Amino acid sequence: MTFDRREFVTAAGAALTAGAAAAAPKPRSAAPNYRRIATEEAFAIPEQFEHLRGLVDTVEYDPDLFLGRFQLTREPLHRRLLDLDNERLKIMDENQVAMHLLSLTAPGVQQFDADTATGLATLANDRLAEAIGRHPTRFAGLASFAPQNPARAVREIDRAISRLKLNGLIVNSHTNGEYLSDPKYWPILEAAAALKAPIYIHPRAPSPGMAAPYREHHLEHGVWGYQAETGLHGVKLIVSGVFDRFPDLRIVLGHMGEGIPYWLYRFGHSHQVTQAFMDRPKLQLRADEYFKRNFYVTTSGVNWLPPLKFCLEVLGVDNVMWAIDYPYEQTPESVAWLNASALPPETLEKVFHRNAERVFRLRAA
Ligand code: MN
């Protein structure tokens, strides 16, 4: 199971870090000190966990609750999700990470009923704004909202961006098996586009309609299900015509684009062929062109140079941002692989911070 391995990696990483710290007082490497802004960094609030505990105790099978049980019980994960002032900043400092772009951990408020979810989103956004207020040079944040009630979601989005000055929005893929491509959610997309707030579509386990084949070998999570679910969400947004209606809407996908960059040629080509036989409005652009125009990707959870080079070539150096996925992934590894990449300094500057500063309207250092 992924988490056993992950915890092994955690333990190994911690041991390595401790050893290095003992041998040499400063972990600073020879790598240039880029301003490192990590763009998919999770936190939790106690009230979210209280409601999650209620689900864990009553729901028999829900692949998202597999993650939920870890969030509630496994250390250091549980502790690190709740911390916005101590260990998180220490780990950032030790690894020369300037800033976390924070977001409420998956699946956020989307597994709760509409009223609970709407209340929790508001509370989480207030807490997030407070944490940014305490550490304005170290944190920025993406606002939560509850798609379960689109009208109230629009009001919260407006409050979070206009009043709390948060830097964008986070959604954890499907909501009760529905996707933002459904016209009932278009007011949310319209608000995001009008406020110039990018929507980060973060993974959660596959929606009920596609979950069954994933269950047998426990594939619902980072093994395969997360990227299949979230990639599907991105594709559905494109083919539904959302970006013809809201051309200014910007979407961010983690994990090197959840597979879409690799399939981009086939996606665009095949859609062009099948669209000719479909009784629905034609897209103004070829499907793959929206991905290049309206999407950004981050490196979260994929500390591997080949797909990064591929994304830089296919999407361009202005459309890829660095991320750790703290505290699920380990900060030293997430920094080290990109430091060691030998990419041109101007590319690394964009991936480590300039693109994030532009996309999320962060203050330049
Ligand atoms: Mn994540």
Image: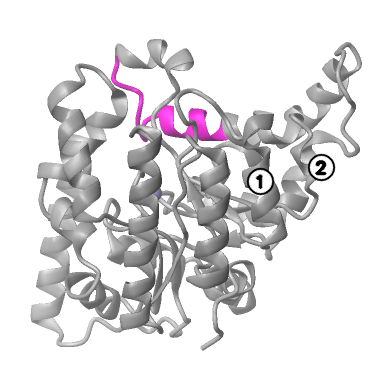
Residue 263 to residue 104: above or below: above
Q: Earlier in the sequence, mark 2 or mark 1?
A: 1
Q: Residues within 10 Å of mark 2 (few under 14, many from 20)?
A: few
Is residue 280 in view?
yes
* Residue 295 in the image: above or below residue 195: above
Q: Which residues are the magenta region?
A: 217-231
Which quadrant of the rendered structure holds the N terminus? top left
Badge 2 amino acid? Arg
Residue 55 x %, y %:
21, 29
Above or below, comparing residue 294 to residue 54 in the picture: below
Residue found at x 32% / y 15%: 215
**Residue 204: within the magenta?**
no
Instruction: Provide residue 10's location: percent of width, then percent of height.
Output: 18, 53
Please name the amino acid that badge 1 sits on. Answer: Leu
User: In this rendering, is residue 132 above or below 9?
Assistant: below
Q: Residues within 10 Å of mark 1 (few under 14, many from 20)?
A: many
What's the residue at 35%, 43% (across, down)?
A: 106
As drawn, the label of residue 340 is: none
Mark 1 close to ligand 1, CB under 8 Å: no
Badges 2 and 1: C-beta atoms under 8 Å apart? yes
On the image, which quarter does residue 248 sit in? Answer: bottom right
Disc 2: which residue: 245
Q: Residue at x 62, y 36 (%)?
A: 185
Task: Give the distance between the C-alpha atoms of the residues marked 2 and 1, in whole angstroms.
Answer: 10 Å
Q: Which residue is mark 1?
A: 189
User: Residue 52 at what x, y percent from top left?
Assistant: 21, 38
The tally of labels here is 2
**Label 2: element kind:** helix
In the image, 48: left or right of 288?
left
